[in-house]
Amino acid sequence: MSDPLAEIVTLLKPVPSIAKLVTAGGTWLVERRELGTPFYCAVVDGHCLLTIPDRAPVPLGPGDFVLVPDVHQLTLSSLQLPPRGTLPQRLETSPGVFRLGDPAGPVELTAMVGHCAFQSGDRRLLVSLLPDVIHVQGQDRFMDLVRMIHAETVGGLAARDMILSRLLEVLLIDALRSAGGNTTSPGLLRGLSDGRLAPAIRRIHAEPGAEITVEGLAEAAAMSRSSFFDRFRRQMGVAPMEYVTGWRMALAKQMLQQRDASLAEIAESVGYASASAFNVAFSRHVGITPGAFAGRH
């Protein structure tokens, strides 16, 4: 049976960026502004506050793990904020180890913080299927995974990047499947947690080359066409055939990058009767022809 969640994470192609061990004391604040990159934090001891624009602040305590798959701006701070205008205190005490706040005061927080990147050419589509924020509490395996990621990052051993990529895949999948279904934002997790929609979603992933219609998906979900369409769009955040096309194109991009199949073979594998029909659909969806895309990548 197809595993859509694992397929999405694999296609995202997570790669390592930065992993830090952070200690802090007193009042402190750090702000991060990025163009849509993943951020995670695992609190070993102490407390801090995660603030993301347009969302309620999230207090974090011992054993908490938080993952933001597509962060553009966030603030991590002490529970009591420093006075406005206070210059940030940040000191790298050793490679990959940072001290925040008063360097002479007691350590009141120990956390492991990491940034990574997604190499997928279709990251915008894939990330849109994930929850905005994942907050998991009291599950020790996340601490173990983050410790291994930090150790690999600062260790500089052979095959470092390969091991880090695999650890990041495991971390993402574990975090995603630990997130609550209907409590998350619309996307793949909510869809898969819906007993009616899950069979239809798995069918899309298992048979991308088959003839797929809204009627056929509704039948797999044992629902009327209109009820299925509305429910799918509400839970997934996109219309059924929009999701089908997006998934097919994500697979096609991967095959074009791998260069191990002809255009006709790729077209057939993602549900198009001919290379010319696929060429038209791909150009409309991506903005360039399959050949131009393969040349760029």
Image (cartoon, helix red, strand yellow):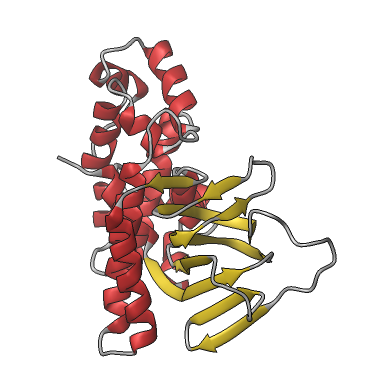
User: Furthest residue to the top?
Assistant: 224
**Closer to us: 292 or 70:** 70
Q: Residue furthest right?
A: 85
Quarter of the image that includes the C terminus:
bottom left
Q: Quadrant of the N terminus?
A: top left
- Please give the name of the residue rendered at 26% of the width and 13% of the height, measured from the top-left corner: 222
Up/down of 155 relative to 267, above or below: below
User: How many numbered circles are shown?
Assistant: 0
Q: Position of residue 150 (x, y in %)?
A: 37, 75
Q: Nearer the viewer, residue 288 or 17?
A: 17
The residue closer to the viewer here, 240 or 275, is: 240
Position above or below: 59 against 36: above
Residue pictured at 50% horizontal, 32% vertical? 237
Residue 176 at x, y percent in the picture = 36, 46
- Residue 263 visible at all: no
Q: Residue at x 63, y 65 (%)?
A: 34
Spot occupied by residue 192 in the image (x, y as percentages of width and height):
31, 32
Picture quarter containing residue 236?
A: top left
Residue 103, visible in the rendered structure? yes
Q: Which residue corresponds to the image point at 28% horizontal and 36% vertical from the top-left?
A: 204
Where 88 sits versus 143, above or below? Answer: below
Outermost residue toward the left in this view: 1
Can you give x and y, in whole percent of width and height, for residue 108 in the image?
54, 65
